[in-house]
Structure formats: structure tokens, C-alpha cells
Image (cartoon, rainbow, N blue to C red):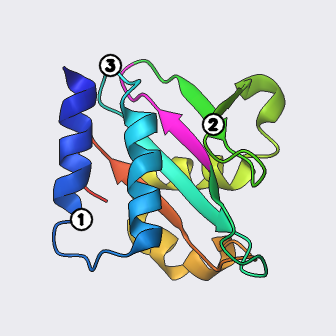
Amino acid sequence: MVATLLYKKYQSLNNDMVKNSLFNEQLLAIKSILSKEKQHLILIISWKKNILVKNGSLYYTALLYNPINGNKTFIKTTEQNPKKEILLDVTTSGIRFQQHLYILENYLEGKEDYLLSVQNSFSSAEMNSPYYIYDFVKKEN
């Protein structure tokens, strides 16, 4: 099953990282996203967490891109309900995911060095967390 394979690849990317509660929350969210996928994909995700709220929820916005058919799926969770994934229409939600689309476009053009040079421009204001690209086609992050 591709979903299980994708999740195992994700786990292997993080074998050498120091694990903490934030990492574990991210791991559960990634597992939830990947468990629904049947093909290899590229995932661009931005984590958010309100640092002013003690024990605040971790939530995210994400773009799933299928390089085989070009399909794009936008997913988000909210601070109020971080476990409920909301799928958004690509045609009407593009403006909210403009940075995700820009990152994807540059990544597909092979401009990884450029994206790394502008990473602070794309950081979330609340947590200063950059966007992450997980490429399960190339098996990289």
C-alpha cells in the first residue's frame, strides 16, 4: 500500500532528529495526511502554533501535489479544531495558498537553492516556522 510506504519514507527522513512533543504532533498530522494517499506525491506544509497560548494546538496549511496527473489538493486545520482536516477547492482557495503554490512552482523548476535563500520570507509569523517540502517522488525533504 502506497500510503504505508509514504509514511515509512517520512519516518526514515527523521531518524536522526531529536524528538519532542512538537515533533510527535507533527508526526501524527503527517501520518493522517499520508494515510489517505494512494500515489507518490509532493507535500508542502506550514506549521502554526500560537505561542501565546499555553498548550496551544498545532495546526497547519498544506498543499499536496500529484506530479503524475498534476492534481493539487489544499488542506488546512484550525487552531480550534486541529484534528479535523478541511479540504479546500483549488480554484477558489488559491489566494490563501499563494505561498505554497509559489514554492511548488519554484521547486518543480529545480530552484531549491533559491527557495533556501528566501526561506525567511515564507516563515509563519506566529511560530517562525518555515514551509517544509516533502518529495516522496524523489524521496527527499
Q: Position of residue 48 (x, y in %)?
A: 66, 64
Distance Cα–Cα, label 2 vs label 3: 16 Å
Give SS at disc 2: strand
Q: Position of residue 107 (x, y in %)?
A: 45, 54
Q: Position of residue 14 (x, y in %)?
A: 23, 65
Distance Cα–Cα, label 1 vs label 2: 22 Å
Task: Compare marks 1 and 3 and give the one earlier in the sequence.
Answer: 1
The disc placed on residue 14 is 1
The span shown in magenta is: 61-68
| Residue 77 vertical position relative to residue 41 in the rendered view, above or below | below
| Residue 128 vertical position relative to residue 44 in the rendered view, above or below | below
Is 133 displayed left or right of 53 in the figure? left
Residue kind at label 1, given as amino acid type:
Asn
Whether residue 15 is visible, yes or no, is yes
Give SS at disc 1: loop
The disc placed on residue 75 is 2
State the count of labels: 3
Give the residue drawn at x 25%, y 37%.
6
